Amino acid sequence: MNKFVTKFLLALLAMTAMAGQARAQFTTTFAKNVTPGQQNGLYYSLPQTMLKLDFVIEETELVKGPLSDYASNYFEMEDYVEYETTEYQLLDVKMSAVANPDPNALFFVTINSARGGSKAQFDVMPNGIIRSVGIGNATEAEAVTPVVAATEPQSCCQAETAFGTGFTGLMTAGKSNAQLAKEVADQIAEIRKAKFYLISGDVEMASNPETFSAMYKRLDDMEKEYTSLLLGKRVVRQVVTTVYVIPNKEVVTQTVAKFSETDGLTVGTGGSGSMITVQTLSLNTTAAINAPSQSAVESMSYENKVFYRIPETANVKVAIDGHTLIEERLIVNQLGALLTAPVTNAKLVFDTETGQIVNMRMQ
């Protein structure tokens, strides 16, 4: 009997030691509950979805001509720029999703400092998003495909931004603006006469189509240059303004910007113009999951467990004054469920874009 009791106690002691070793590997705690100055651990986060909205806007700058005071004397039937201003037109909006660390899913892992036994090994990206975790020798680094940031569309200028050489060529000491305006009008008349002769076939070189096109374009450019001195210019360019939006469960519809034809796009709720809103409607694909509440996540510590996320699918709509600009179905991580996974003799590999566990390798 004594031998049996002795063997039983030794077996129980061994099991207790093994259990204690398993419990002591690491503990996961919500970041806000970490004691200031706490060492022997690391932070990791899960990714949240940030919406990237690229608004394509056409800017038209109305530039007053240096001789505009005399425009009505020579161009009675044509409009001219009286006041310098800029007009805006919203052409398009493009939407994409970007993953970045979620401050509401940031955790601290306390690593056991005891010697011996298997050790927890974490692989975390430079921005803090977790890539993998394993116990013992289950942690060969994963080959990670680098994420290349999207190149911002380049603004393009479709017209000259200054008056050409026509005005500087006419500037002569002692001439008044009235005299210069008369010379400009005479030059325009001569150019239009040359265009008429070219079209009517009175110019021999006009028989060659390529020569005709080149000559006509040159005359047309000269006419526009001189005319702009009196009528002014419309400088048109296309620009892209990017607005970032973080959807959340509490606010389904967010006002992210305002747009007007006189002020353009203003980020935020200030400014004037029509309201631009983003509506994120969850499709509730994770509603059946019995996930812990946010308060439970924040208040408890979890031994030998890590948090992962099952992302949610949502219908995302961008509208201006209720009129839909773009509507797409996207994955929105933070609308999904936060769950815990035990880490024992397996290596867990995470999707760094969603926080989902995509691979489990048993050791």
Image (cartoon, helix red, strand yellow):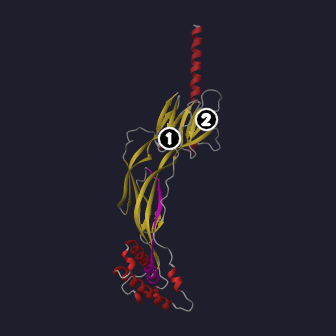
Q: Give the image location of residue 33, x and y in percent.
A: 57, 43
Q: Give the image location of residue 275, x and y in percent.
A: 41, 64
- x 43%, y 63%: residue: 56
Q: Give the image location of residue 185, x and y in percent.
A: 44, 87
Horizontal side of 203 relative to 138 (left or right) equals: left
- x 42%, y 74%: residue: 214
Tell me the amino acid under the disc marked 2: Ile
Q: Earlier in the sequence, mark 1 or mark 2?
A: 2
SS for tag 2? strand
Q: CA distance from mark 1 to mark 2?
A: 19 Å
What is the count of numbered marks?
A: 2
- Res 289 quadrant in image: top left
Tell me the amino acid under the disc marked 1: Val
Q: Which residue lies under the disc numbered 2? A: 111
- Res 40 quadrant in image: top right
Q: Which residues are magenta?
A: 221-248
- Disc on res. 297: 1
Q: Residues within 10 Å of mark 2 (few under 14, many from 20)?
A: some
Relative depth, front residue between 52 and 336: 52
